[in-house]
Image (tube, rainbow, N blue to C red):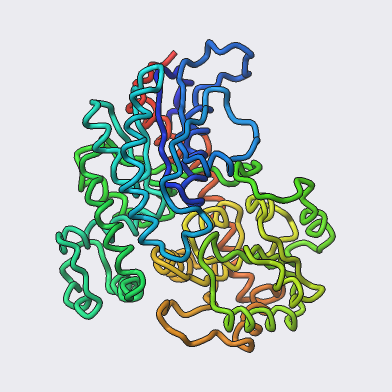
Amino acid sequence: MEIPAPLKLSGHVVVMPYPSRGHVNPMMTLCKLIAASSTPTPPTHSHSNTSLLITFVVTQEWLGLMGSEPKPNNIRFATIPDLIPLQSQIASDIPSFFKAVTANLESPFDHLLHRLQPPVTAIIADVELKFPVAVARRRNIPVALLWTMSASFYLMLHQLGSLVPNRSLKVDLIDDYEGHIPGISSAQLADLRIVLRENDLRFLQLALECVSIVPKTDCLIVNTVQELEAEEIVNSLKAMFQFPIYSIAFPYFKLQTSHLVANSDPNVDYLNWLDSKPSKSVLYISLGSFLSVSCAQMNEIISALNTSGVYYFWVVREVSWLKEKCGNSGLVVPWCDQLKVLSHPSIGGFWSHCGWNSTLEAVFLGIPILTFPLFFDQVPNSRQILEVWKNGWELKKSELGSEELVTQEEILEVIREFMDLGSGKGKEIRDRALELQGICDLAVAEGGSSNMNLHAFVKDVLCVQGH
């Protein structure tokens, strides 16, 4: 396969992520990849190698959350006012936050584009923002959209939206859709039954509105490794639209300190704690940045962990009361650099909510996953891990609306075997995790599918000329 030549970039690209952690991180990573694609080898101290400027647009709150980690000189920040709820308020009403973002940020974003210099030559925005396509069309600016979830979940939403154009989704009618939604299997319909529970229905309807905007864009970027998802899914997406679709996997395996910071000591004492533990002996636990489980379920989890004999590293927002309950085998922190933790040799497994970013990070790093889905696309992501990739085990049945607890005894049995390096079943998923890691490594290497798609996107959309 021909390896693309270095590129010389030009123009001014404005980038707008959806203002949530699971969206800001991949968008910034994409920007760094674009900037790096024009960097000569060896690098020079002059700025003649590129005249591309990337303006990363965030709210004022998010600017305060962005860290001081070095980034390419041609990436800068621009802010718009805080006209949406604070990040700490998202969990209380996700649909209301979603509506506030789409309703309140369009006007300041449009005004910012008018003020920015040099003139904007392209826009990259998150699908879930909905408004950037309309703004770009009014200003006659090319626009690319980034989808931060799996290709298979996008296909599910797109097909569902086309079948139910008024988005009047009803849980009790989901069985009527079977056999009438191309590309959606019976298993995926079962996932939809779970996602379409009452508390998530409003959010899903809003997501379908965003997906309905995608046909109006100039291209779509999907954050995935195309070899990890069924070939027919990627082909179905490409057949749907007249514009290009780029499957670009972000190279999570390249250890970089996160650009998102917490209000914590920068000396990262937790790394010293990990250094003191044997290889593959620690279970890393993270159940997402804004959703949580019930207090009753937390008590079952804590009791199981404290009697398991397994070392665990738990990231959770409210740590004060939890620290008092956790035993000597565990460390609880409010925030960590997840890539650094997952890359640490002491980590032997990841108990995850199955958000797409966390899922890909684990796959890139060859870490087996204990699935515990809580919301939306996490349900089909868990199914992907368990039934397609086979690099994990299930801890929680994917029935999000159920009040039934996963008991201490059930948790205890699973995590002991999951973390037992001598377990035959455990060896199977660890071997499979390493196999998937190899697939990802090839995809992002020079000449790999993701590398070539990144090159094609930069060349096609950013009006790049080769040397």
The residue at 63%/79% (across/down) is 301
Q: Is residue 357 visible?
A: yes
Q: Is residue 11 above or below residue 307?
A: above
State the image coordinates of residue 194 (x, y, percent, origin top left).
Answer: 35, 75
The residue at 63%/86% (across/down) is 408
Q: Is residue 288 above or below residue 325?
A: above
State the image coordinates of residue 259 (x, y, percent, origin top left).
Answer: 60, 41
Left/right placement of residue 312 relative to residue 206 reads right
- Viewer-proximal residue among 159 and 4: 159
The residue at 30%/69% (across/down) is 201
Q: Is residue 447 visible?
A: no
State the image coordinates of residue 304 (x, y, percent, origin top left).
Answer: 68, 82
- Could you say which quadrant of the image residue 116 lies in? top left
Q: Where, quadrant-wise, is the N terminus in this rendering?
A: top left
Q: Is residue 221 above or below residue 404?
A: above
Left/right placement of residue 271 relative to residue 225 reads right
Left/right placement of residue 14 relative to residue 419 reads left
- Could you say which quadrant of the image residue 332 lies in? bottom right
Residue found at the far right of this picture: 276
Q: Where, quadrant-wise, is the C terminus in this rendering?
A: top left
Left/right placement of residue 14 relative to residue 213 reads right
- Viewer-proximal residue among 344 and 467: 344
State the image coordinates of residue 466 (x, y, percent, origin top left).
Answer: 41, 16
- Viewer-proximal residue among 153 and 74: 74
The residue at 32%/73% (across/down) is 187
